[in-house]
Image (cartoon, rainbow, N blue to C red):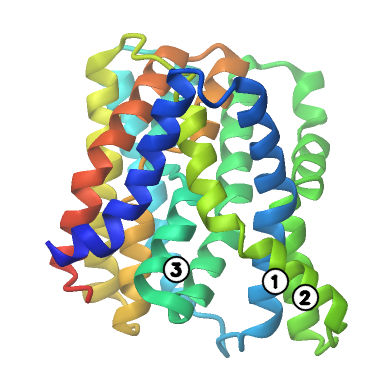
Amino acid sequence: MEILIDIVLPIFGTLFIAYIAARTKLFSTKATEGLATFVFTFAVPSLLFDSVSRHPLPDPIEWELLISFFGTAYLIWLAGMLISRWLFKRDFAHASLAGMTAAFGNTMLGLPLVLTTFGEAGSIPIFLIIAFHSWQFFALATILLEGSRRQNGTLKALPWTIAKSLATNPILVGLVLGLACNILAIPVPDPVADITGFLGRAALPCAVFVMGASLAKFRITGAIGEAVAGSLLKLIAFPALTYVAATYIFTMEPLWRDVAVVMAALPVGINVYLFADRYEAGAPAAATSMLLSTFLSFGTIATVLTLLEVR
């Protein structure tokens, strides 16, 4: 109960308040879009830059953490694709999105959740995961979906499309700049540190709020069976297998393992729907999975934190 009150309730309470505010038009669509731009372009990149540039990096890189998390993620992605193909008889593009649904979490929720739960000690493991998260999954989804179109011209342009997408992602830019300053021992001028620190303090509450407000524009649009399957893989199978990998296959500090498990337990990220809508491949299932997993994760994340005996 203490975990529910102290950690989960403030974050999900803020999310639900934003959701209700947007649904009742107390917070307009334009306001949501403006806040989302601020969070994605300024606040979160500033937070990542400020934290990564200041904190000592693990030496060597904790590859066991990354393999535990991402190795499990790809197994879950494959399981989602196979279930979509064999059980629901979907085409390859649709199945690719089903796999992404099962593996791609909402890191904008994970960031405040991990930092609220573990404090500064959780910053480096979560930033390592975030640093490898989006570009890997975006690249894999793009390759699978573009490949399913079987257009040579499109495939030839694929490396450039992926590179351009990554280079123009403000979150990745903030991470890379922070890592560069840290690794190369480049001193960050005090005015820059003050500004990024100030902007970064707005990132966590604003990210949760904009996530809740953004969810209000989506609806339960069908494909309930597929959405349930994707949500179960995302909320239960992914964190359970990550825990097994991080505990019994690899050896790492309990805190790093716990961060990986919490990140694995996040609900489906909004980008899954954006991919599905862009490629016209299972958008109803993606939207329903996103909403269903977000509301169910209030209970599943509280359960995960309790089982991990987080204090």
Q: For mark 3, what is the residue?
A: 115
Locate residue 151, reporting x and y percent.
73, 16
Give the quadrant of the C terminus: bottom left
Q: Find residue 194 and name its label.
A: 2
For badge 3, the amino acid type reads: Leu
The residue at the far front in this view is: 26
* Amino acid found under the numbered disc labelled 2: Asp
Horizontal relation, residue 39 to residue 291: left or right: right
Residue 99 sits in which quadrant? Answer: top left
Q: Quadrant of residue 138?
A: top right
Q: Residue at x 68, y 84 (%)?
A: 54
* In front: label 3 or label 1: 1
Where is the N terminus found, in terms of image quarters? bottom left
Whether residue 49 can be seen here: no
Task: Evaluate whether residue 7 shows in this view.
Answer: yes
Q: Secondary structure at mark 2?
A: helix
Residue type indicated by callout 1: Gly
For marks 1 and 2, give the CA distance.
5 Å
Within 10 angstroms of label 2, few (less than 14), some, or many (20 or more) residues?
few
Give the label on residue 197, or none.
Answer: 1
How much space separates mark 3 and mark 2, taking CA atoms? 20 Å
Q: Residue at x 57, y 30 (%)?
A: 144
Q: Secondary structure at mark 1?
A: helix
Q: Does the residue at mark 1 contact the one at mark 2 (Cβ under 8 Å)?
A: yes
Measure the alpha-carbon separation of dots 3 and 1. 15 Å
Compared across the picture, whether 297 is left or right of 121 comes to left
Q: Earlier in the sequence, mark 3 or mark 2?
A: 3
